Amino acid sequence: MGTHPALMFFLLFSATLSSSCDGGKVLVYPMDGSHWLNMKILVEALHSRGHQITVLRTSTSWYVSEFSPHYTSITVIQEQPQNIESQDFMTSFLERSLEIRQNEGSLWAFFEFYSNLFNMVRENHKAVVKVINSIFENKTLIRELNETGYDLFLTDPAFPAGVILAHYFQLPLVLNVRWIATGEAHFAIAPSPLSYIPALFSQYSDKMFFFQRINNVIYHGMLVYMHYYIAIPPYQAICDRYFGNDVNAMTLTQGADLWLMRVDFTFELPRPTMPNVVYIGGFQGKPSKPLPPDFEDFLESSGEHGVIIMTLGTLLGDLGPDKSEIIASAFASLPQKVVWRHVGKRPVSLGSNTMLIEWLPQNDILGHPKTKVFITHGGTNGLYEAIYHGVPVLGIPLIFDQYDNMVRMRARGVAEIVEVTTLDAESFTSALKNILNPEKAYKQNMLKLSQLHHDKPIKPLDNAVFWMEYVMRHKGAAHLRTESYKLPWYAYYCVDVMAVFVAFGLVITALFWVSCRCCIRCLMRTKKPKQD
Ligand SMILES: *[C@@H]1O[C@H](CO)[C@@H](O)[C@H](O)[C@H]1NC(C)=O
Ligand SMILES: *[C@@H]1O[C@H](CO)[C@@H](O)[C@H](O)[C@H]1NC(C)=O
């Protein structure tokens, strides 16, 4: 039986139709620095599924390159890099943070810590506002973006520029998120009781004593202050001008269709969530590739002792000469081989068992069977790779969320933490020996965590792609979003309802009291004549 020409035509027609549906147009407003490394993974995954991606970047961008096989870029002129986009600024911010940390525990250090953070954030918000303004003022660019007819806006809302643009173009909005401008993302949309949810910078786990809970409320209070006085106001002029004064940067963020949360509950502490939150923590995880021969030989030469790998992230090459000497001499006293990503001067006390390099294939070494311990600053990219490959961790947390991340790992029994400001060879070596000691079960715990992390119906990255396509197919996902963010606070907490109940109760009590008094009086009046 020959194929009917009409059927043939129908098949061809439906093939072109479905392919035009599959290939969506996605506009991306990323955040620079290590956040871009995350976003890039999503961009590449979307590209491999046949979507067309446009990335908005600034002319002073640190990590986001202008040319890529995976996306086309649009460059917005920015006169001066934002402070989070500048290596020099971040290095000095880190130095200042560590100085402050030396006096940790004092009230002075507490306020210094927040003032350092607030200044940094405030300056950056100002720069972001300038970028949004220069996009809005460029009518050619606005028309171009509007005419392209994007199907989806993908952004990292740590600074809310993308959220504002998405609202302007009325595009379905998906967030690739762990942090928003005012702290951890769940706090913006899901109930987050401070009795068991540790605030950012508190360094608590989900079990807090009474006094820790008092502190937890104070730590959260600082972020609430940041919300109202630092993070939200700079954007209000733009919101007033383009959208009217009933919206602000926060409500626009809360109005997002879908939250791809870079969280996995093998790592994060359990907490309430929402139907439009999709957990993609560990989506960067991938199997390791074979190492270059010189690396492979070095790792294999470690024999039964195995290998320690150390890197302090993309931001920081080393901890300065003094700390580097301490670390080098501690490594030299160990039987293990060490691969150390170190950018500064070569330490004098470096042992022959230690290989210094300026860049290392982190994922491939973590996946190598000889690797025993991962020494890290505690950024989530590295921690998820360690969980993926089941390698226990020694944390030297430095800034931002890194302490809190390491506290979570320690609570799972898969990590130890050393304090950078008081780092000495003895504590460093003993922490390493603990982790290497099979009796202490760090390795078993980490393997267990790794199993839990892998035991999923769908890989986190595939899940992320599914949900982005879902939002494109349905032109949003408003049916998954609660209405909570549109309520004023007194309605959210039912304070108005309680007030009515209390008032009603008071009226009843008053009526009861008045009628009792009447009854008693009447009784007395009726009794009196009898006595006469
Ligand atoms: C406005 O946008 C267009 C298109 O992207 C670009 O060519 C032009 O340089 C921009 N103008 C300014 C002043 O940034
Ligand atoms: C985009 O274009 C449409 C149709 O031409 C128009 O109605 C809409 O106002 C434009 N939006 C913006 C933000 O310019």
Image (cartoon, rainbow, N blue to C red):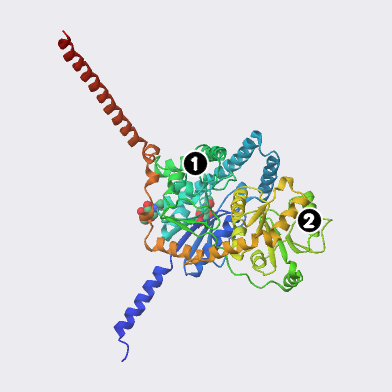
- Dividing the picture into quadrants, the one containing residue 248 is top left
What secondary structure is found at the residue carrying circle 2?
A: helix
**Residue tagged by mark 1?**
232
Quadrant assignment for the C terminus = top left
Q: Horizontal and vertical percent for residue 414?
A: 62, 57
Q: Is residue 87 left or right of residue 277?
A: right
Q: Is residue 460 left or right of residue 246?
A: right
**Residue tagged by mark 2?**
330
Q: Horizontal and vertical percent for residue 327?
A: 77, 54
Q: Nearer the viewer, mark 2 or mark 1?
A: 2
Q: Nearer the viewer, residue 490 or 521?
A: 521
Residue 33 makes an appearance in the image:
no
- Confirm if mark 2 falls within 8 A of ligand 1: no
Instruction: Work out how far the residue at label 2 is from the one at label 1, CA to CA, in angstroms.
Output: 46 Å
Q: Which residue extends farthest right? A: 348
Q: Horizontal and vertical percent for residue 178?
A: 52, 52
